[in-house]
Amino acid sequence: MRRITRTRRDWAADLALFLFAACFAAVSSQSIPVAEGLGPGWRAADQVAGGLGCAAVLLRRRAPVRLAVALLLAGSVAHYLTGPTIVAVYTVAAARPWKATAWLAALAFGPLPLFLWQLPDMSEERAGSAVTYFALIAGAIGWGLFRRSRQQLIASLRERAELAEADAESRAARARLEAREEIAREMHDVLGHRLSLLSVHAGALEFNPGAPRAEIERAAGVMRESAHLALHDLREVIGVLRAGPGTDPSEAGERPQPELADLPRLVAEARAAGGRIELAGPPEGAAPPPLVGRTAYRIVQEALTNVRKHAPGAAADVRVTGGPGDGLTVEVRNTRPPGPDPARGTVPGPAEGGGQGLIGLAERARLAGGELTAVPAGDGFRVRAWLPWQG
């Protein structure tokens, strides 16, 4: 027999069913019909069998089907086994598969056709006792099936609750990850542009400390202005991220997010830092959707930042074409950077980043429904993106 580990609740249930079987045998002892010719010895043997059957109820968890079959067969001649039989049948219906319950029900109700055939010739007492027996067996099977279906329902609800809790935790984790990625992209795009301007002018002053006073003052002014704008953009990004979904940036006390029309201002800032940049576009007429315009602006901003970081002194060509229905195409191409020239006050800048900016741009383009490629082109590098613009 397999080893059964019972909790206190299991022991309480087993003892309660044992008491039920014993009390049922005691209460029904006076109503058990005794056939003529059977003396007190038969009743004593029947009572002993009933006591053993009640004790066997405590073993119902080890082999419920075999116990129920044994009690059903023995109960056909030992009337005091009715109580333990009811408990055993209930246990099978509540704990065993449907197939086992069906076979047990067939065994229990197998004598029913014979009983119905002999019913006209039976005494009223014996017929009433048999009807009560079959009714009790049917009730035990029905109650056991109800108990099992209820347990299955509770287990299903518990599993669904656990799955829902796990799904909620997973969605919360994804939301936190998306928030971190959004913060990282905004910080990288906004601050990278400003800090790269600072790096260019600081590198020029470091490389050429004997530059004319007017040039030093101009560089210091650009550095101060870039630092001021970097702090302002930092506050703007934090304010936008703190605002709830659907919040108007003007209501949050911050400037609106950049649009495609802000590209000339961005290029003018890069030219003021000494960049050689040609801008073609953006197309005149209808403005693209805010998400498309903002994505195009960020792509150009990050591409110019990469030019300053990885190809200082190189010329850049920015082209923005397209329109409603055709989509918006953004292309930034730069030439091979020249060598360091002390007279121009430029030096090669650091090349940190490891391509994370381009990865962020590709993700931005994907979220907007477009695509982005960044590949070497001739003697330089090209970043090209296509963004959908519905007609």
Image: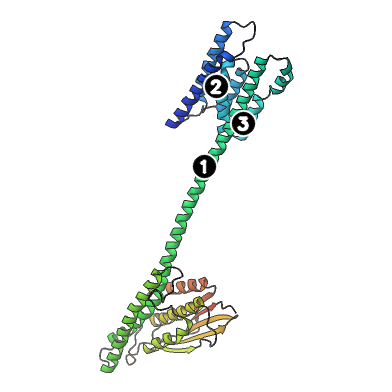
Q: Secondary structure at mark 1?
A: helix
Q: Give how far across and how far down residue 202 sits, in percent.
A: 30, 84
Q: Contact, CB < 8 Å: mark 3 with mark 2?
A: no
Residue depicted at x 54% and y 81% = 329
Q: Give how far across and how far down residue 45 sits, in percent.
A: 56, 10
Tell me the residue that label 1 is attached to.
155
Q: Give how far across and how far down residue 210 sits, in percent.
A: 25, 91
Quadrant hosting residue 225: bottom left
- Sequence-earlier tag: 1 or 3: 3
Q: Which amino acid is tagged 2? A: Pro
Tell me the residue that label 3 is attached to.
101
- Sequence-earlier tag: 2 or 1: 2
**Front one among 217 and 359:** 217
Residue depicted at x 57% and y 83% = 323
On screen, 4 above or below 34? Answer: below
In the displayed orientation, state which residue is furthest to the front: 124
Residue 351 visible? The answer is no
**Front one among 50 and 142:** 142
Residue depicted at x 55% and y 29% = 91
Q: Which amino acid is tagged 3? A: Thr
How many numbered markers are drawn? 3
User: CA separation, marks 1 and 3?
Assistant: 21 Å
Residue 247 visible? The answer is yes
Tell me the residue that label 2 is attached to.
84
Badge 2: how crowded within 10 Å, few (<14), some, or many (20+)? Answer: many
On screen, 322 above or below 9? Answer: below
